[in-house]
Structure formats: structure tokens, C-alpha cells
Image (cartoon, rainbow, N blue to C red):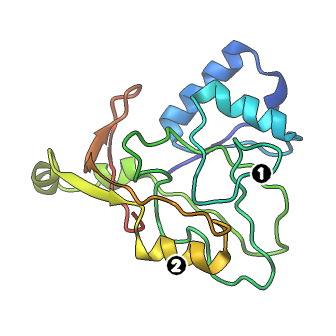
Amino acid sequence: GVGAEITGIDLKNLTDAEFDAIRQAYAVHGVIFFRDQDLTEDDHIAFAERWAPINVNRFFAAHPDYPEIALVAKEPDQKDNIGGGWHTDHSYDAEPAMGSVLVARVLPDSGGDTRFASMYSAYETLDDETKAEIDGLRAVHSSVSATYATAVAANSVSQGKAVQAEQVLHPVVRTHPETGRRALFVNPAF
């Protein structure tokens, strides 16, 4: 499985010990959910900065008052799914972001789900022969993905920005620096 839900905590007023526990839970579970938070944009940025320097997704329009926040927005008439294929955010960067901090502001009555998969489990369930075959291999990650580019263009999320395409090589199997767990680092979108 993937993910954990943490309750009974206010993300705006975390102690260092609470943040350390959240960081450990993230390392173990890969995705952390917090419900019923009332975060302003400043709170969102402050929480993200506790994790690592912010790496803004350049394919999406920036918030007009908070350039550290990329807006992932759709209008009711936009039917194409943005990022709907399985992907890892920023895998096309030479140094991928350690994660994404998402805050849902406006949600539809139904649909709009974001789903997650454990690439730890994907790797761990491979047979030993396949693990040996892929160990040491590298894969091309590119921001020129046809699937992603089509979704971005269809939803005008880049708002006409010219975005430079990048292409990098990453190991097919990565080892988490804190847990030592190995995970597949491949995705069809990039």
C-alpha cells in the first residue's frame, strides 16, 4: 500500500518534533494526507519550505501573488485530465523534487481524484531475475512527453508560456536516502 493519514495536527503550528514525525511518516508511506486544514497561501509556502527548497512546476501558471505556487486549475468545460497518466512530478529535472505539497482549494462534486501508487511495492514484487536485470540501468526522463504536452496544451495551464524541454537520465531503481528502500523510478508520462 501507499499513503497515511495524519489527524489531530495543525500544519500552521508544528513543533520541530511533530514535523520530524511527519517527515519520517512520509519517508515510510510515500504520501501523507491531512484533512480539515485551513491553510493560507503563506501557510502553504511555509510548510513546503520546511521540506526542501521549492521547485515550482514550470508547466503550470504561477499564482499571481505567490510565484512559489503553481496553479493546477481546470474550468468545467475542460474535459482532458491534467497529469492523469501515472507519473512522478519533476522526474524530468536533473534533480527531481523530493515531493509535491498539494492543497485542494476548489473541488468538483464528483471526480477530480488524485491517485497514488507505491513504486517501492512495484519494485519489491518483481522477481529476483528482473531485479538483477534492471539494477544499474538508467532511463531517459523527458518533459517533451506527448501525453503530458497534450494535456497541458488542452487545458491551457501553461498560459502560453514557452517552456524549455529537458531530457535527463536517472537510475531505473533508486534507493531512498533515509529508509534505504529501493523503488522503481520510471513512469510512462515522462
Q: Number of callouts in the render?
A: 2
Nearer to the camera, 13 or 7 = 13
Residue 161 in picture, x, y percent from top left: 61, 63
Nearer to the camera, 24 or 11 = 11
Q: Secondary structure at mark 1?
A: loop
Q: Can residue 9 be seen in the rendering of this structure?
A: no
Q: Residues within 10 Å of mark 1 (few under 14, many from 20)?
A: few
Left or right? Give the position of 50 relative to 92: right
Residue at 66% x, 76% y is: 155
Q: Which residue is mark 1?
A: 63
Q: Which residue is mark 2?
A: 150
Say which amino acid is labelled 2.
Thr
Q: Secondary structure at mark 2?
A: helix
Residue at 55% x, 26% y is: 24
The quadrant in which the C terminus is found is bottom left
Left or right? Give the position of 17 relative to 41: left
Eyeballing the image, is 155 above or below 68?
A: below
Residue 1 in picture, x, y percent from top left: 49, 51
Residue 67 found in image quarter: top right
Residue 156 in picture, x, y percent from top left: 67, 74
Q: Residues within 10 Å of mark 2 (few under 14, many from 20)?
A: some
Residue at 45% x, 58% y is: 164
Eyeballing the image, is 79 above or below 188?
A: below
Mark found first going from the N terminus, 1 or 2:
1
